[in-house]
Each structure stands twice: as structure tokens, then as C-alpha cells.
Image (cartoon, helix red, strand yellow):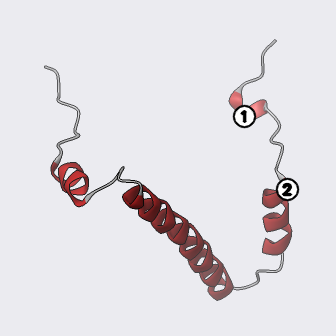
Amino acid sequence: MTQTYQEKATAFNPMQLQLLRMFSYVKTEEQLKEIKTALCDFFFKRVEEGMDRLTEQGEWSQEKEEAILTEHLRTPYKY
């Protein structure tokens, strides 16, 4: 008998466990908002660093960015 997605146990990694422990101290919506902002800032910084690295390596350019911004990615409807 196979387990469905909902029945499978989730094993948290050490970072997830640490965050869960820390979140138990959050008591107000304002604190939650501050944490969300801090996490967003953290991941935004990582994305910026990754994009800078790609640019330095010549794998990303303004031309590629413009091409992506103007690309039509919607799946055409089939009738």
C-alpha cells in the first residue's frame, strides 16, 4: 500500500527546526512583519549576488534581460 502525498511524514532539516523554534517567540503581527521583511531582504540579497556573478561571468547581459522582458510566454489556446 502506497502513501498519498498528505500521509507522508515531513522531516524538517536543521534550519527549518531552528526557524520553527524561533517563531514560537513571535507574539504580534508587527513582529511577524519584521521577520518577513528580514527574510525577504536576505533572499533578495542572494539573488542580487547571483545575478552579479552571472553578469561578471558573461552569462547575463542587458540584452538578455530585454529579450526576456519582451518575450511572450503565454501558452496559446487550442480550439
Instruction: Name the kind of residue labelled 2 in the image.
Output: Pro
Q: What SS does tag 2 mark?
A: helix
In the drawing, what numbered circle is on residue 6?
A: 1
* Residue at far top of view: 1
On screen, residue 17 versus residue 62, left or right, reads right
Q: Residues within 10 Å of mark 1 (few under 14, many from 20)?
A: few
Count of numbered labels shown in the rendering: 2
Identified at 78% across, 16% down, the residue is: 2
Identified at 70% across, 85% down, the residue is: 28
Instruction: Name the kind of residue labelled 1 in the image.
Output: Gln
In the drawing, what numbered circle is on residue 29?
A: none
Q: Where residue 38 sits in the image (x, y, percent)?
A: 61, 79
Which residue is under mark 2? 14
Q: Residues within 10 Å of mark 2 (few under 14, many from 20)?
A: few
Q: Nearer the viewer, residue 15 or 52?
A: 52
Q: Which of marks 2 and 1 is in front?
A: 2
Which image quadrant is residue 9 in? Answer: top right
Q: Where residue 32 sits in the image (x, y, percent)?
A: 66, 79
Which image quadrant is residue 17 in? Answer: bottom right
Q: Where residue 7 sits in the image (x, y, percent)?
A: 78, 31
On screen, residue 54 versus residue 37, left or right, reads left
